[in-house]
Amino acid sequence: MRTWVKAGAGVIGAALLLAAGAGGALLWAGNQSLSKDHGALPETVAGGPGDAALGARLVSVYGCNGCHGAALAGQDFYGMVASNLRRRAREWSREDFARAVRNGLRPDGTSISWAMPTEMFAAMADNEIAAIHAHLRRLPAAGDAQPVTLKHRFFKAYHAATGELIPNAVLVRATDAGPAVAPEPGTAGWGAYFTRMACAECHNHGLGGFGSDTPALADAIQIYDWPAFVRLTTTGRPPDGRELRLMTGVGRERLAHMTDAERRALFDYLKSLSQP
Ligand code: HEC
Ligand code: HEC
């Protein structure tokens, strides 16, 4: 009896050791992938220091504060930490900051992962990235509102090991390079530029939508006239007044910060997409 118990305990112990070993190997692989040096590409940001007032508006319109926290001091984002941007902007030069947002690379060459929509921001204009950097630096220094815990580290390592957490460095293409200065609302190129920054994250590149999650914008815009569009992009309410699952928040928190010129140009651009 005793020997049987001992043998049983031995088997269980061995199984536990094996499981721990496999788990350890997985986490090790995940950490290897997360700490891989992709080589920090040289990055230049044309123009002088950014326009902080423009940056203050862009962190809302482009949704930085939705994921990084209203105070931009960090926030839990589905088990990961969307970092304290006030801190990063102080630690990182304008070029370092631009490389992180547009190329997905930190100064040490490690890649920021897929939860951060680098693919969309890869084409951000120099004047806009400089503006965001200037705005963040103008805010008072703030400690991490969401420190990185062991749980966050495990989560990241696990999902990196299973391949779900794609390094952004591999997603960005050379052809993504943005302009020195963002186009003016209403000029050629503005609509494609602005919607990539502000809508593509959820409505897909080309604005064709993501299946049943988000509509193609060329279709969705058809029921909108100008007053209804103003309402959607300030209060988040569609023509029938319903509260939409996600878009109501986007309208109220993000698009309400567009300028009138941007709102009008966006409406005209979306309408032009639905012309046959
Ligand atoms: C959909 C959510 C989301 C949005 C929108 C978003 N971020 Fe992020 N961002 C994240 C997450 C999550 C991380 C951390 C990813 C990781 O740890 O690999 C991150 C990482 C970063 C980093 C790297 C910080 C570091 O410590 O490594 C910078 C810089 C950054 N974001 C800037 C921005 C800016 C600027 C904007 C707006 C233009 C923005 N982010 C919009 C989710 C988001
Ligand atoms: C964070 C994700 C997100 C972003 C960013 C976003 N949308 Fe949406 N949008 C949605 C979702 C999700 C829906 C479907 C309704 C819902 O579930 O909220 C939607 C629905 C819509 C609709 C249809 C609303 C209706 O009448 O039912 C329009 C029009 C629209 N979005 C326009 C835009 C435009 C224009 C932008 C960029 C300026 C944008 N959205 C950015 C998530 C987003």
Image (tube, rainbow, N blue to C red):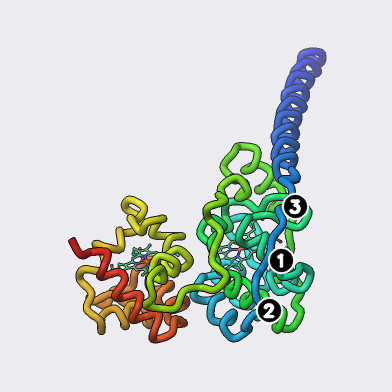
Name the secondary structure under disc 1. helix
Q: Residues within 10 Å of mark 2 (few under 14, many from 20)?
A: few
First reached walking from the N terminus: tag 2 or tag 1: 2
Name the foreground residue: 114 vs 125.
125
User: Where does the image place residue 131, in percent across and percent down from the top left?
Assistant: 62, 78
Name the secondary structure under disc 2. loop
Q: Which residue is mark 3?
A: 150
Q: Is residue 11 above or below residue 250?
A: above
Q: Which residue is mark 1?
A: 95
- Quadrant assignment for ligand 1: bottom right
Q: Tell me the amino acid under the disc marked 2.
A: Gly
Name the secondary structure under disc 3. helix
Q: Tell me the amino acid under the disc marked 3.
A: Leu
Mark number for residue 48?
A: 2
In front: label 2 or label 3:
2
Q: Are marks 2 and 1 in contact (CB under 8 Å)?
A: no
- Marks 2 and 3, Cα distance to the nearest angstrom? 40 Å
- Please identify the quarter of the rendering in which residue 186 is found: bottom left
Q: Residues within 10 Å of mark 3 (few under 14, many from 20)?
A: few
User: Where does the image place residue 181, in percent across and percent down from the top left?
Assistant: 54, 73
Q: Tell me the amino acid under the disc marked 1.
A: Glu
> Residue at the location (77% across, 25% down)?
13
- Marks 2 and 1, Cα distance to the nearest angstrom? 12 Å
- In the shown orientation, is residue 28 left or right of residue 255? right
Name the foreground residue: 126 vs 112.
126
